[in-house]
Image (cartoon, rainbow, N blue to C red):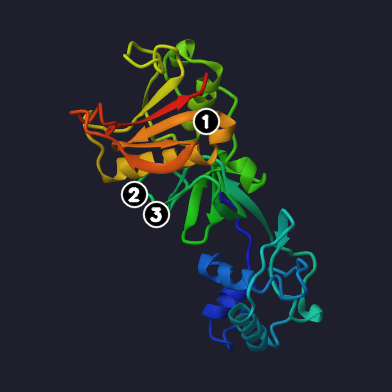
Amino acid sequence: MDTYRPRRIADDALDAPFDAPDEEIEDKPHWRGRVAKGVLAATCLIAGFSVVTASTLTSASQPAQAVDEVTMLAKSVDVPEPTPEKLLVGGVLDSSQLDSSSLLSLTRAYVKAEAKVYKSAKESGEPLATLAIGKKVTLTGETKGSFSYVIAEDAEGWVSTKALTTETADLAKGIIETPCERNTGNLEAGLTAKSIRVFRSVCTLFPDVLNYGGRRADSLPYHPSGRALDVMLASNGSHVNASEEELGWRIADYVTQNWQKFDIDHIIFMQKIWTPSNPNWRLMSDRGSDNANHKNHVHIAVKS
């Protein structure tokens, strides 16, 4: 089944000669993300109010004037942070030319779990980008199966709908209380309630992580008591590569930003330690191996 994709006449008019016949314009591709950003800049021109545009014009007598005004507004307006959750996008150029039955609605949303952006609506090929938790995006209303087409500041494409939320950015970065859907064995059985909250959140929000460590014997009390979680990153088992290290720092950053909610005692990664009492990453002494120096996993410990 063909997926419905809303249309904007400004996209076609920008690409077509101004004297092109209507049928020639209608046959051209109708969604261009780069134009979406330009038209989006025109939305807040009228004193911060949301304004509407039509996806079709009932008259093509002045297309050049319409496009010139959109282009001028997009270049001259600094867009303020929109306050409504939903935004009807576009510039009202001439109400006599608008078909009020054809309105295009874009919705602001946030990334609630790290999301990869793909060129097509499936998880195949090299991702165009990875959107971090809390990243603001614009939903275009286009969907295919379990994917939604989004526009972000530095990327656009298809993203898993499950990774998005229309809640606020703070809630998008919040704590996940429900069990992780991925099979992680019986890890929670040996963890404290606080450690389980950390595990469920990291497991859900960072799906690229496949392995975890929990309760185990150790000379320090954190793992034996179920108060520590090891987020395993190294695919070769010993040392993270560049992309795995980047993922580890994103996880560490997420946990430090939410340290109060998690009641964090300390975090260790790449031979560096972070504590709430001294919230800076400090180099630790060499313990002799990549595992002991936490160069293959992020170690997260909570208070008792």
Front in this rendered view, residue 139 or 292: 292
Find residue 126 and name its label: 2
The CA distance from mark 1 to mark 3 is: 25 Å
Relative vertical location of residue 73 with respect to residue 183 in this rendering, above or below: below
At label 2, counting other C-alpha atoms closer than 10 Å, the crowd grade (few under 14, some 14-19, many 20 or more) is: few
Q: Position of residue 29 (x, y in %)?
A: 52, 67
**Residue 243 in which image quadrant:** top left
Single out the mark in the foreground, 1 or 3: 1
The CA distance from mark 1 to mark 2 is: 26 Å
Q: Amino acid at mark 3?
A: Leu
Q: Position of residue 172 (x, y in %)?
A: 60, 42
**In contact (CB < 8 Å): disc 1 and disc 2:** no
Front in this rendered view, residue 40 or 15: 40
Find residue 80 and name its label: none
**Which residue is at the far front?**
277
Provide the residue designation for mark 3: 128
Q: Amino acid at mark 1?
A: Ser
Relative to 121, 269 lies left or right: left
Relative to 287, 161 lies left or right: right
Check disc 3 and report its element: helix, strand or loop.
loop
The CA distance from mark 3 to mark 2 is: 6 Å
Q: Amino acid at mark 2?
A: Glu
Provide the residue designation for mark 1: 201
Q: Residue at x 66, y 63 (%)?
A: 81
Q: Residue at x 32, y 33 (%)?
A: 233
Who comes first in sequence, dot 1 or dot 2?
Answer: 2
